[in-house]
Image (cartoon, grey):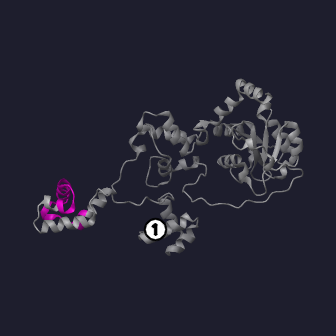
């Protein structure tokens, strides 16, 4: 179905505001399935509004050319009246039937058609680029990570460059076929259509005894220059399944911890303590957690690990933003409503490795694994220990 410019504007406005297909349809008097068909055809991405380049002739100028021809003016005289090069006017007249057949409206429509002609995408032009992008998507890299990696890996090869937005459009836009629509399953959201961002309300959590608030945490933790400060939380599956996650603030290194005995406080304490077995003592500086009841034994945990445990303010999970962001990435693998007990320790380690091996923009496109290894190296640990002693 064809929509007017005003209807399309109303559709995109409703979609941007996060309305449902039905609510968007109410704006333009169309059923939900018609709106869904329209939006899916564009992948949920609003097309870029075409703008006429200032160097191109306008409809008004073409009218002036037509009048000049009718008056018997020469090409040079017409060009002078428009303050255009005579070659521009000459080509315009020649490509539109010559002086005898030139019509302003037809010429302007032909120009618009030429502007909208299908242009080959970079992925279609460069098969090697397409092959690399597909391979990285299959490793669940985000388009931003792929675009940055290409720039760093092929600095002198302009054919191996692609913006992250171009990758998204090749996945979502139904009329592009370079990337299979199934590639959307490798994105974090797994959606087949781009949706606008919408905020969600934070929910309250239980109250624990003798909590040390995050306001008591040393200010040095905030700058992320010192490794060894961790953030943690649970990722819930189908009740009663869950896993615990730990993220090191400086390197963004992640650990995914199985909870085969459930997520009650004693089980979480034992599992988290075991997860720190391979972490050098100098990289156990602090742990920040949300206010979940699973941390009821936080005082014993702090004693066992010899590290301080801090808690976010009520309804403020953003105060441990690294862990919140990581948990969102993990939802690609640990989907809501699934039984997380089916994931073995090996499975969870493989998922963590996927995240730790990716280049990260926040790390100047280094990987978390490389940064964490550098912090865990004997030389680094020795220098850190010496500095702390001094």
| Residue identifier under label 1 | 8
Residue ID at (74%, 27%): 381
Q: Is residue 77 left or right of residue 298?
A: left
> Compared to 53, does 106 lie above or below?
below
Residue ID at (49%, 47%): 167
- Quadrant housing residue 26: bottom right
Residue ID at (78%, 48%): 289
Q: Is residue 22 left or right of residue 313?
A: left
Q: Is residue 298 visible?
A: yes
- Quadrant housing residue 342: top right
Q: Regarding mark 1 in the picture, which secondary structure is present there?
A: helix
Q: Nearer the viewer, residue 232 or 238?
A: 232
Image quarter (top left, top right, bottom left or bottom right) of the C terminus: top right
Provide residue 322's location: percent of width, then percent of height: 69, 46
Q: Nearer the viewer, residue 140 or 72?
A: 72
In the rendered structure, does residue 96 fall within the stretch colored magenta? yes
Q: Which residues are magenta?
A: 79-107
Label 1 environment density (alpha carbons within 10 Å; few <14, some 14–19, many ≥20): some
In the rendered structure, does residue 31 fall within the stretch colored magenta? no
- For this orientation, the residue located farthest to the bottom is 29
């Amino acid at each position: 179905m064809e929509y007017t410019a005003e209807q399309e504007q109303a559709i995109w406005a409703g979609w941007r505001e996060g309305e449902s297909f039905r609510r968007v349809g109410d704006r333009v008097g169309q059923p939900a399935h018609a709106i869904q068909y329209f939006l899916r055809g564009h992948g949920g991405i609003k097309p870029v509004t075409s703008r006429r380049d200032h160097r191109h002739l306008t409809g008004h100028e073409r009218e002036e050319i037509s009048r000049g021809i009718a008056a018997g003016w020469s090409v040079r005289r017409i060009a002078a009246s428009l303050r255009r090069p005579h070659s521009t006017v000459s080509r315009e007249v020649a490509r539109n039937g010559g002086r005898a057949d030139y019509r302003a409206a037809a010429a302007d429509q032909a120009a618009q058609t030429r502007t909208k002609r299908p242009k080959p995408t970079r992925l279609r032009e460069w098969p090697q680029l397409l092959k690399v992008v597909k391979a990285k998507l299959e490793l669940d890299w985000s388009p931003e990570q792929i675009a940055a990696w290409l720039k760093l890996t092929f600095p002198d090869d302009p054919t191996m460059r692609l913006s992250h937005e171009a990758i998204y459009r090749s996945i979502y836009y139904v009329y592009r076929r370079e990337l299979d629509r199934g590639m959307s399953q490798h994105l974090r959201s797994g959606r087949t259509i781009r949706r606008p961002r919408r905020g969600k309300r934070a929910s309250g959590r239980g109250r624990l005894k003798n909590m040390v608030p995050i306001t008591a945490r040393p200010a040095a933790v905030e700058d992320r220059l010192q490794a060894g400060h961790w953030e943690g939380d649970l990722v819930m599956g189908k009740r009663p399944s869950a896993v615990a996650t730990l993220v090191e603030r400086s390197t963004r290194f992640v650990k995914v911890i199985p909870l085969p005995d459930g997520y009650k406080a004693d089980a979480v304490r034992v599992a988290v303590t075991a997860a720190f077995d391979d972490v050098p003592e100098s990289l156990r500086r602090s742990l920040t957690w949300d206010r979940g009841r699973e941390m009821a034994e936080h005082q014993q945990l702090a004693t066992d690990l010899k590290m301080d445990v801090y808690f976010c303010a009520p309804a403020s999970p953003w105060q441990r933003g690294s862990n919140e962001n990581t948990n969102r990435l993990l939802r690609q693998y640990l989907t809501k409503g699934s039984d997380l007990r089916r994931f073995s320790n090996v499975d969870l380690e493989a998922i963590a490795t996927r995240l730790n091996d990716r280049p990260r923009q926040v790390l100047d496109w280094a990987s978390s694994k490389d940064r964490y290894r550098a912090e865990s190296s004997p030389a680094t640990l020795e220098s850190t220990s010496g500095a702390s002693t001094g």
